Image (cartoon, rainbow, N blue to C red):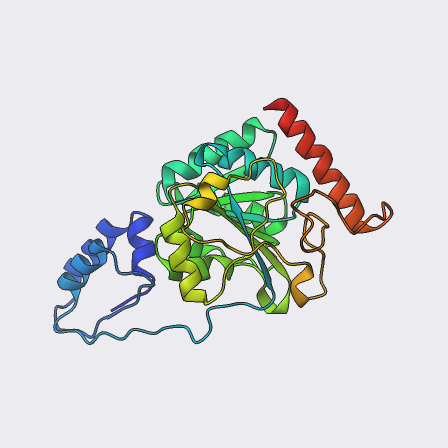
Amino acid sequence: LVLDEADRMLDMGFIRDIRKILAQIPKKRQSLLFSATIPQPIVELSRDMLYNPVSVSITPESTTVEAIEQSLMFVMRSDKRRLLTYIIEEESPDKVLVFSRTKHGCNRIVRQLGQDGIDALAIHGNKGQGARENALRRFRNGTLQVLVATDVASRGIDVSDISHVINLDLPNEPEVYVHRIGRTGRAGQGGITIAFCDENEGEYLRGIEKMIRQDIPVDEDHPFHSEKARSRKGNKAPKKQQNRGRGRRQPRNGKSNGNRSNGKSNHQSKNGRNGRRSNRRRSRKRKHQARH
């Protein structure tokens, strides 16, 4: 008996089916159980299906992905949804995978994005098989821009050209962050990941940065930057560096190092790509500030 991605099966609501199968097969058997995480329900299931098991734990050799551009945005929890909308409107990304900690959170994000005119669907354990398959099909063929998922449900997402991964909620397990950002930048392609950190997630952020052995560069150039959320981290994170050595694109703000404090940019050309991005962002920033 082989049970692969057991935690995902439990999250997707298959525990009853699993127990029915266990009741119908011989008790004398060889059993293998694989799971990326070991929550309590998995522990209880393993007691039912395994006898005196040998446990094998594998840690990834590398916890960073060089092709991925990471950034961190400090924001109050109440502003996360508006910041998400702002980024999607500013970046116009092709395929965005958004991570939420809970199933209810996924549904709420999809509903709020819909109110902002952004097409999005959710995938999690409370969704029926047909709904999940429809969401994945649309996401793969490019007719759905935003897919919102829980960590466990996202393991069924095999899409190679995801342009952006946004951590709306930071995971409480650092390893999960690595799994999340690995959804983009596949096959050597570039990818962009953005992590939101609110006033209650400083501890999670410290754990993540300790594991990946680097500080995630901070992007302050958005209308919802919160020094209060930043102060809860406990230590200063670095500001986002220009281009960070990959030669793929300038940072979204189009500014060089050290110019955030006075709001000036060394990239004055309005004809270049970065000048246009910077102008669009400043224009939208003013609109958001006026609106809110």
In this orientation, does residue 152 appear?
Answer: no
User: Quick one: 256 or 147, which is closer to the camera?
Assistant: 256
Up the image or down, 290 lies above or below 143; here it is: above
Question: Where's residue 239, x and y in %?
Answer: 58, 54
Residue 227 location (% of width, % of height): 50, 41
Measuring 57% from the left and 48% from the top, which residue is drawn there? 96
Q: Nearer the viewer, residue 219 or 30?
A: 219
Count of numbered labels shown in the rendering: 0
Q: Residue at x 62, y 50 (%)?
A: 141
Q: Position of residue 33 (x, y in %)?
A: 26, 67
Does residue 214 appear to the left or right of 162 in the view shown? left
Which of the 4 quarters of the picture holds residue 291? top right
Question: Which residue, as the protein is rendered here, is positioned at the far top?
Answer: 291
Return the residue nearer the eye: 273 or 58: 273
Q: Does residue 108 sit above or below 160 in this rendering? A: above
User: Considering the image in quadrants, where does the C terminus appear?
Assistant: top right
Q: Quadrant of the N terminus?
A: bottom left
Measuring 12% from the left and 71% from the top, which residue is drawn there?
51
Depth check, front residue: 125 or 288 = 288
In the picture, measured across the screen, residue 223 lies left or right of residue 177, that is right
Residue 271 seen in render: yes
